[in-house]
Amino acid sequence: MDFEGTVDKIMPVTKGTSARGEWQRQDVVFEMNEGSFTRKICVTFFNKPDDVARLREGAAYTVSVNIESREYNGRWYTDIRAWRIQPKQETPAGAPMPDMPPIAEEPAYASAPAEADDLPF
C-alpha cells in the first residue's frame, strides 16, 4: 500500500540484539491530509537507517508500507512497516502541460430541425 504524507516527527532509534543478530528500528510519524481532515500515521523503519537519515521534517514523501496485525495474549497489535520511500514529485503551478494533440473542431449543427425528407433512413 502507498500513501503520500508529510514528515511530522522522527522518533529516536531503538536498537537490540536477537538470535538473528543486531537490529535497529525507528518510527516516523507522517501527517496525511484527506480533504479537511488531517490524519497521523506512525510508520516503522526496521533496519533502514539510511532511509530515515534522508528524511526531513516538513517534507512530503510517497511511502510504500506493509500492514500486518497479530494477536498476543488476546490483544491485537498492528505494525506498519515501510519498505520504500520516495520524495514527492511536485509540479510547479506554472509548469506547462505536456504536448497534447490538437483538439478536433466540433461539427457544426443546424439551427433548425431536419425535415423528414432530409433524414438518411
Image (cartoon, rainbow, N blue to C red):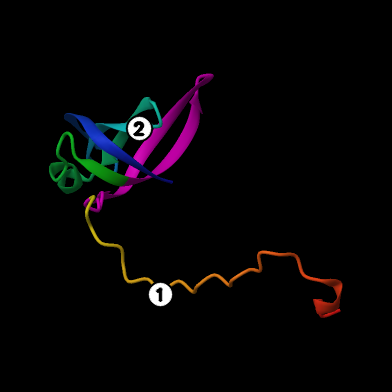
Determine whether, in the image, residue 53 is placed left or right of residue 6.
Answer: left
Q: Earlier in the sequence, mark 2 or mark 1?
A: 2
Identity, as a three-letter code, of the amino acid under mark 1: Pro
Location of the C terminus (image quadrant): bottom right
Task: Find the residue positioned furthest to the bottom.
Answer: 120
Q: Is residue 11 above or below residue 111?
A: above
Residue where numbered disc 2 is placed: 33
Where is residue 10 drawn, in percent x and y? 18, 31
- Residue 52 point in image, percent of width and height: 18, 42
Rate crowding at label 1 as few (under 14), some (14 to 19) or many (20 or more) other CA atoms within 10 Å: few
Indicate yes or no whether the magenta region holds residue 109: no
Q: Residue at x 30, y 36 (%)?
A: 44
Answer yes or no: do the residues labelled 2 and 1 have beta carbons within 8 Å? no
User: Which callout, 2 or 1, points to the residue nearer the camera?
Assistant: 1
Percent position of residue 56, x then y? 14, 39
| Quadrant of the rendered image containing residue 113 | bottom right
Q: Nearer the viewer, residue 71 or 119?
A: 119
Q: Which residue is mark 1?
A: 101
Q: Residue at x 50, y 72 (%)?
A: 105
Magenta portion: prevailing SS class: strand
Point out the stretch of residues depicted in magenta.
63-92
At which x and y percent is residue 55? 17, 42
SS for dot 2: strand
